[in-house]
Amino acid sequence: GVDTGLFKPDAEARASLRGRLGLADDVPVIGMVARWSPVKNHALFLAAFAALLKRRPAARAVLVGKGLAADNPELMRIVSALGLENACHLLGPQAAVHQLYPAFDVLALSSRSEGFPNVLVEAMSCGVPVVSTDVGDAPDIVGEGGRIVAHEAEAMAAALDELCQGGPALGAAARERVEQRYGLDAVVQGLQQCYLRLHASKNAP
């Protein structure tokens, strides 16, 4: 479950990060929160973002997580090869991610494999729609709160482009889905019901 009181839309947090990065409120910002690892497949995300820039030249990417900094030579080779030096903000690991999500217009997840990707639930709780590859529980999480795509750069770019123009209604739908299915109260109630069913089954004649 996610604390929807902590992970929530926050206009001040949005303005703060964007101000820090020199980004106006109308700049399309695509965020990715994931440590640098082959399984997270940042190369796919960066290729998709490069394709998105052909549609939306003003868009910017914000990458958060361990290894997502300019001192990562492998990452910088990819960024340079795609010509993204001036379009990517590399923030490295950040403790208060709940203050970062609201600054994004879309969150991307390009993983090759996942279990239950918490970043999707956290971003959606902040009113941020998501684009994710078809991994783990992502399809069950996302629903009407975003798009599930194949592991292909152009497909991800098209979905990112679509969601950039989705407006606040899509973000509101994402948060509502999390509140109903993954908010702490909903998760606690679901677990209680599960325990009660198991208890009743164990004690049945």
Image (tube, rainbow, N blue to C red):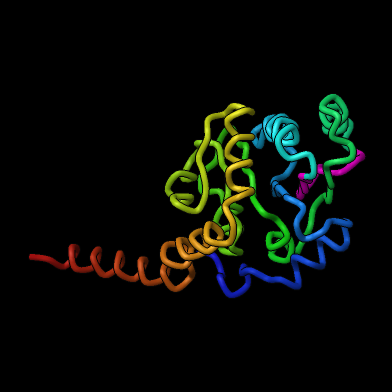
Q: Is residue 197 above or below residue 67?
A: below
Residue 70 percent location from the top left of the image:
90, 40
Q: Nearer the viewer, residue 157 or 107?
A: 157
- Left or right: 174 as drawn, with respect to 43: left
Residue 8 percent location from the top left of the image:
61, 69
Q: Nearer the viewer, residue 121 or 191?
A: 121
The residue positioned 77% from the left and 52% from the top of the image is 27
60 part of magenta stretch: yes
Residue 42: tell me if it is visible: no
Residue 21: tell me if it is visible: yes
Identify the residue at the far left of this view: 205
Residue 44 percent location from the top left of the image:
68, 30
Q: Main SS type for the magenta part? A: loop
Q: Is residue 124 above or below residue 179?
A: above
Please identify the quarter of the rendering in which residue 85 is found. Answer: top right
Magenta stretch, residue numbers: 59-71
The residue positioned 84% from the left and 41% from the top of the image is 87
Identify the residue at the far right of this view: 71
The residue positioned 79% from the left and 44% from the top of the image is 58
Q: Is residue 108 above or below residue 112?
A: below
Q: Please state, as top left, top right, bottom left or bottom right, where the C terminus lies in the image.
A: bottom left
Residue 115 percent location from the top left of the image:
51, 44
